[in-house]
Image (spheres, grey):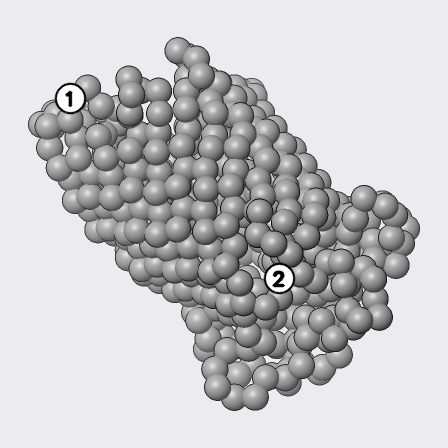
Amino acid sequence: MLLAISLVASAPRTVRAASAQKQSEQKKDPDRREIGLVPAISFSTDIGLGLGALMSWAKFKPGYDPFRYRIQAQAFFTLKKGESGFSAPFHSDYVQLDLPDLFGRRVRLNFELAFRRFSNAGYYGLGNASSGENPYAGGDVRAEQHFRYVRTYPSLQARARVMLSDSRRWQLLAGAAVTDNAFSDCDGDAPCPETKLERDKRARAVDRELERALRGTDDHLLPTAIVGVVYDSRDHAFAPSRGMFHELSVRGSPRPELVFAGVNATLRFFHSLAGRRLVLAWRVVGDMLLGQVPFYELSRHGGLFPDDSLGGATAVRGVPIGRYHARIKIFANFEMRAQLLPFELFGLPMNLGAVAFVDVGRSFTDYRAITRLDGDGHGLKTGVGGGLRLLWGDAFVIRADFAWSPDAEPLGVYVDVGHIF
């Protein structure tokens, strides 16, 4: 759920931006260390203004591409104004180790130790037809907290990508993680107003669907693992103009009472319409969960880049985070990306561009029809909008997106690092 981080931190996408351009790299000592410290700044209508710092220590050595190792650390939090004043909805600190060029360029290893706290996590009920109607009036602190809960989740993670061909297009993904989850109804020491999550937890005794879906609501330690296959033929890792980037992965946990599995299929396509100046990019994601799934996983999709869905900055933009909880999620994004104004800044090539997009998705509570939770129509969730892109050097994209959706409150605004896919 690492949202936004412009100069920031959206998990693995972050400080690759700090690497210099290829031409300037050639003038540097090939056997060197580089230390970088940059501000972490972002904005999202879901979690507010993000502030923090990001540090990188990279060791370059001949024979290793792009470096021998990199240590990256982040301290980051967000501020958002609500009815009861300012709060810090999201907190993220981590240390990462990246070993990208092992065993003859066949293996890339990543490790992460992280502490994260999300005090603005959304829960509006189950299913594609869950209601956003709040029983409390605006201006009441209970209205602000009714669809929210607090999740604190420090974690330790290790991942490997093994190149299966000399072209490096086919890759095997494998990883494991352990997360310590703790929950509360609201932030602070004051008595908490009753939330939607608390109401549904009480109703589990008489509602079969709630009893089946609302698992993992108590504090628990969750070990998980993932395996998958990746195909990558893009002509550029950060701003591709042609090629494909696909993945098929399976994840899950063996923990008693929370034994579950998730299958993720993601297809990404990039078509050049006018060189690099105009690109049509589109993505289709299907994510299915089976077994005793922790309730917070019902509003996320997994795979190589796990994130929130259907809402948030990287799925159907304009839909709030946590708006829909379901076992099956299918969504697609279509973007027309244009590079409009090339220029130079501090000796680095820049390009100011724009994007127009349409996002569409649908969720299903379970593998059988449940009309009272999913509705009886097409039930499509949509987001439309546009935004700006700044391609900074060769490996850094800053984006600002503005999205309208029937679920938006009233407009989704996101400032982040990198294209959403």
Quadrant in which residue 405 is drawn: bottom right
**Residue reaching furthest front?**
256
User: Which residue corresponds to mark 1?
Assistant: 62
Image location of residue 314, percent across then percent down: 55, 46
Q: Is residue 375 left or right of residue 180?
A: right
Q: CA distance from mark 1 to mark 2?
A: 48 Å
Give left or right: position of 277 versus 365: left
N-terminal of the pair, mark 1 or mark 2, is: 1
> 181 and 338: which one is in front?
181
Coordinates of residue 136 in the picture (x, y in percent): 72, 82
Q: Is residue 309 left or right of residue 14?
A: right
User: Residue visible at 31% across and 46% down?
Assistant: 96
* Mark number, residue 7: none
Q: Amino acid at mark 1?
A: Pro
For residue 417, which quarter of the picture? top left
- Position of 72 relative to 117 (above/below): above
Question: Helix, strand, or loop for circle 2?
Answer: loop
Crowding around mark 1 (Cα neighbors within 10 Å: few <14, some 14 to 19, many 20+) is few
Q: Looking at the image, which residue is at 61% across and 54% down?
A: 256
Note whether residue 263 is visible: yes
For residue 360, say whether it is visible: no
Q: 65 or 17, which lies in front?
A: 65
| Residue bearing the label numbered 2 | 216
- 105 with respect to 283 (left or right): left
Above or below, 70 against 45 in this view is: above
- Residue 366, image x, y percentages: 79, 48
**Callout 1 secondary element:** loop
**Number of residues whose C-alpha sits closer than 10 Å to that of mark 2, classed few (under 14), some (14–19) or many (20 or more):** many
Query: How far from the left and from the top, in percent, is residue 198?
Result: 68, 75
Marks 1 and 2: which is nearer the front?
A: 2
